[in-house]
Image (spheres, grey):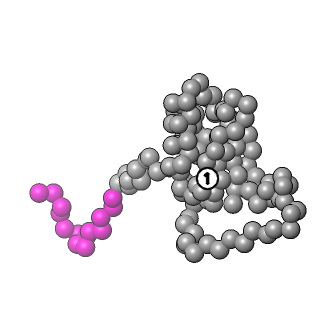
Amino acid sequence: MKKIVIQVHMENDKCRSKALKIAAASQGVHSVALEGESRDQVVVTGDTIDSVCLTNKFRKKFSNATLISVADANASDEQQGGGGGEQKVETTLEKKLPIAYCYANFPPPCPLYVVDHDPYPNTCSIL
């Protein structure tokens, strides 16, 4: 599990709601939260999240987003308050999906030319 923190310039609650929807729509996201003094940091936790692609989505919508940190969520939980003797045991039954790339908006490249093999090379092909 990864924990990604992205700082986004959000002026009002409507912008914060849009930011949460953008983050929640990404593949592999388990939880989304707002942090910081002015609630301008989006914290996304999950598996197979492309942090650069997510930051670019925020930049496209809000024109100002900064990737603050990418860390292992389990390690950050242990540093903050772990040590109470409890251990988290996670069992996932879902099948892991491949990493989603940010190239989903572009169509696949088409070939520039096609070479056909002529089965009768000595015949005239002009009609």
Neighbor class of circle 1 (other Cα within 10 Å; few <14, some 14-19, many 20+) is few
- Whether residue 67 is visible here, answered yes or no, is no
Residue at x 70%, y 56% (from the top left corner): 2
Query: Does the magenta portion include 122?
Result: yes
Q: From what the image shows, is residue 34 above or below residue 121?
A: above
Specify the farthest residue to the top.
11
> Where 81 falls versus 59 (above or below)?
below
Quarter assignment of residue 90: bottom right
Side of 105 where 117 appears, left or right? left
Residue at image location 84% in from the left, 55% down from the top? 81
Q: Position of residue 36 (x, y in %)?
A: 72, 35
Magenta stretch bounds: 114-127
User: Where is mark 1, residue-wise?
Assistant: 31
Taking 127 as reference, is 116 left or right? right
The residue shown at (72%, 72%) is: 89
Residue in the image at 44% along x and 46% along y: 105
Q: Nearer the viewer, residue 63 or 29?
A: 29
Q: Main secondary structure of the magenta part?
A: loop
Instruction: Please state the total of marks drawn on the protein image.
Output: 1
Q: Secondary structure at mark 1?
A: strand
Return the residue found at the far left.
127
Instruction: Give the residue type at disc 1.
Output: Ser
Residue 98, horizontal then vertical, whole percent: 56, 65
Residue 60 locus on image (x, y percent) = 53, 34
The verdict on residue 44 being magenta is no
Q: Is residue 71 left or right of residue 30?
A: right
Say if 78 sits above or below 20 in the image. Answer: below
Image quarter in which the N terminus is found: bottom right
Q: Residue 12: name its quadrant.
A: top right
